[in-house]
């Protein structure tokens, strides 16, 4: 259970420095009852707690440490509806109609996040952006063109950029790129902290430093024990991020890797950076880049198939230098210096889709696990899907992301 402590990141994190006086919440000291218990105080857990509470569902959220202190602090804050798996590839995997439905749900989720952010009590650094998805090599061009054609045919409003147009807008040349509109960027740490505050105002009961040590009972009558109290809940939501062991029961196999990111010192100007596009590429693992309001560059990549982050500053710095060399290839005139750099655990599923929905073997217990590069998007989807399920409704993409879907590999715990 949540008493298991897993190292999720190592290095110097940027986002927590942007709100050093974040609010704190008490630990649970006495028994409570609720309709829904959310376990996990990161992006997904807080999104679920906020949405459930705002929908009139009596909700408790517990976090074993501090809100937003885990993977949320290492999140690079890109909100893109395009997935790590291309729409054209997903169409082969699950069928074109289902793949398009899933992509539209991701696009809708960006809009939902934008609307929620606009109503929060604090500014969270959200800016609308377009994304620039470029071919890493000539060999990737045919698949990228196929992707553009499918997105265009289904009305996603994409643009195709040829080498001449790319070179006219940027100081680099690529063989082709897709520009998608309707994306956004945000400060994930400030967003989650503000969302937690708004959730508490809506009736969410939030407790930090409260690990879930055991779960007993069944749907409608669960008992969860913490260090100092019991929680009686009708439903349980596991929003435990990259610590899947916490959820217990049968498990959906996840590939847990590590990735690297850095944030530069502020630059005098970013005029070379066309419309502050968010950049990413077709290579796997891929490089991705964005900017911040104060002219910093946030970039990441260099994924490695190892779960535990490196625990050496020397190793982090070595990857940071590689990232900066990639930045220099794209923007040779930028004199960027790194200021923050880290290594963090990153999770993917076997079929490139999140795990969201009720555990078929344990009714009343839900997974909200946004594995993949679109974790924040998946958090928004999970919040609404689980809310709908508790209310007796079915979200349109429930079968696509269900824990027992075809393609998800279930292994014994």
Image (cartoon, rainbow, N blue to C red):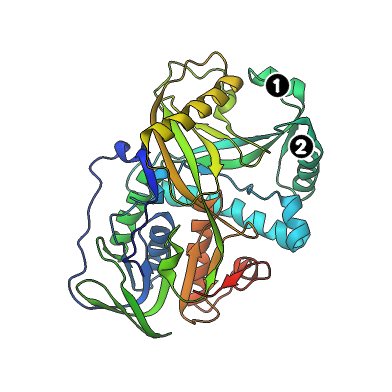
Q: Position of residue 398 (x, y in %)?
A: 61, 69
Q: Which residue is mark 1?
A: 173
Q: CA distance from mark 1 to mark 2?
A: 15 Å
Residue 153 disc label: none
Q: What residue is pinned by disc 2?
A: 140
Total number of numbered discs in the rendering: 2
Q: Identify whether 301 is placed above or below 265.
A: below
Instruction: Please tell me how crowded label 2 is: few (under 14), some (14-19), or many (20+) other residues with Cα within 10 Å.
Output: some
> To which quarter of the image does residue 19 belong?
top left
Q: Element at badge 1?
A: loop
**Residue at image point 40% right, 61% down:** 45
Q: Earlier in the sequence, mark 1 or mark 2?
A: 2
The reply to whether dot 1 and dot 2 touch (C-beta < 8 Å) is no
SS at mark 2 in the image: helix
Task: Judge by depth and name the residue closer to the eye, 132 or 354.
Answer: 354
Residue 299 is situated, as x and y percent measured from the top left of the image, at 50, 33
The 10 Å Cα crowd at callout 1, few under 14, some 14 to 19, many 20 or more, is: some
């Amino acid at each position: 259970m949540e008493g298991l402590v897993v190292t999720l990141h190592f290095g110097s994190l940027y986002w927590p420095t942007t709100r050093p006086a974040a609010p704190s919440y008490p630990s649970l000291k006495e028994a409570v009852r609720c309709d829904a218990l959310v376990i996990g105080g990161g992006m997904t857990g807080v999104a679920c707690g906020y949405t459930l509470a705002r929908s009139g569902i009596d909700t408790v959220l517990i976090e074993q440490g501090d809100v937003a202190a885990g993977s949320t602090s290492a999140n690079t804050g890109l909100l893109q509806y395009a997935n790590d798996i291309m729409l054209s590839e997903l169409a082969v995997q699950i069928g074109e109609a289902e793949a398009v439905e899933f992509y539209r749900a991701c696009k809708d989720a960006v809009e939902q996040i934008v609307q929620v952010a606009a109503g929060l009590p604090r500014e969270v650094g959200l800016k609308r952006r377009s994304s620039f998805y470029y071919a890493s090599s000539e060999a990737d061009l045919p698949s990228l063109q196929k992707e553009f054609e499918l997105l265009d045919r289904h009305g996603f409003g994409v643009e195709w950029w040829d080498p001449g147009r790319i070179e006219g807008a940027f100081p680099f040349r690529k063989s082709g790129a897709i520009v998608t509109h309707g994306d956004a960027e945000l400060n994930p740490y400030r967003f989650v902290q503000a969302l937690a505050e708004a959730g508490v105002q809506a009736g969410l009961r939030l407790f930090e430093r409260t690990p879930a040590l055991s779960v007993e009972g069944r749907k409608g009558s669960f008992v969860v024990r913490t260090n100092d109290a019991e929680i009686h809940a009708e439903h349980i939501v596991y929003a435990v991020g990259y610590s899947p062991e916490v959820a217990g029961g049968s498990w959906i196999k996840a590939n847990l890797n590590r990735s690297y990111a850095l944030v530069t010192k502020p630059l005098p100007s970013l005029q070379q950076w066309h419309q502050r596009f968010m950049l990413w590429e077709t290579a796997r693992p891929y490089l991705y880049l964005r900017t911040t309001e104060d002219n910093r560059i946030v970039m990441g990549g260099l994924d490695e198939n190892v779960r535990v982050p490196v625990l050496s500053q020397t190793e982090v710095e070595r990857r940071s230098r590689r990232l900066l060399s990639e930045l220099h290839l794209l923007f040779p005139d930028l004199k960027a210096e790194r200021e923050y750099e880290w290594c963090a655990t990153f999770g993917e599923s076997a079929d490139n889709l999140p795990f969201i929905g009720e555990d078929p073997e344990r009714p009343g217990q839900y997974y909200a696990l946004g594995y993949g590069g679109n974790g924040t998007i998946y958090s928004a989807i999970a919040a609404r899907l689980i809310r709908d399920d508790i209310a007796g409704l079915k979200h349109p993409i429930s079968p696509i992301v269900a824990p027992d879907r075809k393609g998800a590999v279930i292994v014994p715990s």
